[in-house]
Image (spheres, grey):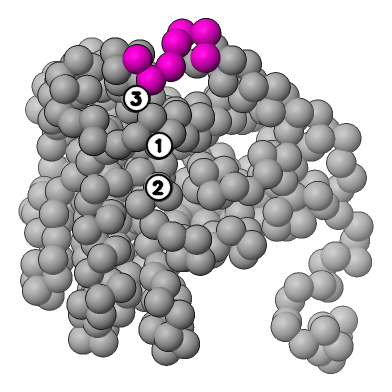
Amino acid sequence: MPGTDAPTLAASGTDLSQQAAAGTNFPKETYLQWYEQMQLMRKFEDKAGQLYGQQKIKGFCHLYIGQEACVAGAVSALEKGDKYITAYRDHAHPLALGTSPNAVMAELFAKATGCSKGKGGSMHIFDKEVGFMGGHGIVGGQVPMGAGVAFAEKYNKTGKLCICYMGDGAVRQGALHEAFNMAMLWKLPVIFVIENNGYAMGTSVQRTSNVTDLYKIGLSYDMPSEPVNGMRVEDVHEAVARAAERARAGEGPTLLEFKTYRYKGHSMSDPAKYRTKEELEDYRHRDAIEGVRHTILSQNMATEADLEAIDEKIKAQVQESVDFAENSPFPTPDELYKDVYVQADYPYIHD
């Protein structure tokens, strides 16, 4: 791997043909679902990056390009009613769960028709209807919240679980250890996921952590923990399915370290000069979307024309979302006083 600080993958192969040969024990419908979901995430984020450059999207903006398998594989492995929570790289999760691209794009534009009514922006997207409990801007802040969501599911005996995503930089937060301890003590139905893209905000794991195999942190709490090739959607699905089975059986949490890679900088303001072009290109050769595409075509699950039709459909969806966002109104000033408290007539807000 180029560069001494380059992240490493628990890879099943270094090229697409090897990855495809590693296992295709999923039906055609699942592969086509993965392809469509991941292409929607990719094309949506590509467009968001362009719009940010045009200053139509403002503030902070963290793109998910390269990490799509980390969400697609989890969604296919879990059930409707399960809850998802993550940090501020949060555009892709609701898209995979079924939130309208129109609502997500409108939120990026800070429009009233956004899924958070234009009040959250890029880092605070929520959609309760699909079980997405939001993106959260405090580094590591979602970890104890994810444990809390899982506590609620257990307390209410819903049979559902919470999957809680965090970046590799968040594992240095003290709240993580408190949450891990409580989750194990109470056997909460939660799957903790470290999306290890190697660089946190811009400094490699090797330079910031004595423990570079981050899944081993869970072993301190006797939490079942394992590394997962986050560039291969099949591996993600299988690991999440195993963890979900444990959680639903009342056996408690699991920690999964998805070894993945982001092709863009930490945010749109990050030029990512801390890595080489050769390293980036090396990871592009393991692209999860291209891996699924290769499997579909090599296994005769669909034709090039079929996949091109999906691509065109997604291109139209993304453009529709942009048109919707541009034509939507901004929130009115009185929205400042709404959604502050659950009690609609709570006094003192204006005082």
Along the line of sight, the residue nearer the viewer: 345 or 307: 307
Q: Is residue 160 visible?
A: yes
* The C terminus sits in image quarter: bottom right
Q: Amino acid at mark 3?
A: Val
| Residue positioned most to the top | 305
In this rendered view, identify the residue nearer to me: 60 or 282: 282
Q: Which residue does the numbered mark 3 point to in the structure image? A: 292
Q: Determine which residue is flagged by label 2.
A: 76
**Type of amino acid at the residue the image marks with label 2:** Ser
The residue tagged with tag 2: helix, strand or loop?
helix
In this view, the residue in front, 202 or 72, is 72
Q: Quadrant of the N terminus?
A: top left
At which x and y percent is residue 307? 50, 16
Residue pointed to by mark 1 = 30
In percent of width and height, residue 292 lies at 34, 24
N-term mark: 2 or 1: 1
Q: Residue at (42%, 72%) from the top-left corner?
A: 160
Q: Residue at x 43, y 34 (%)?
A: 29
**Pointers 2 and 1 in contact (CB under 8 A)?**
yes
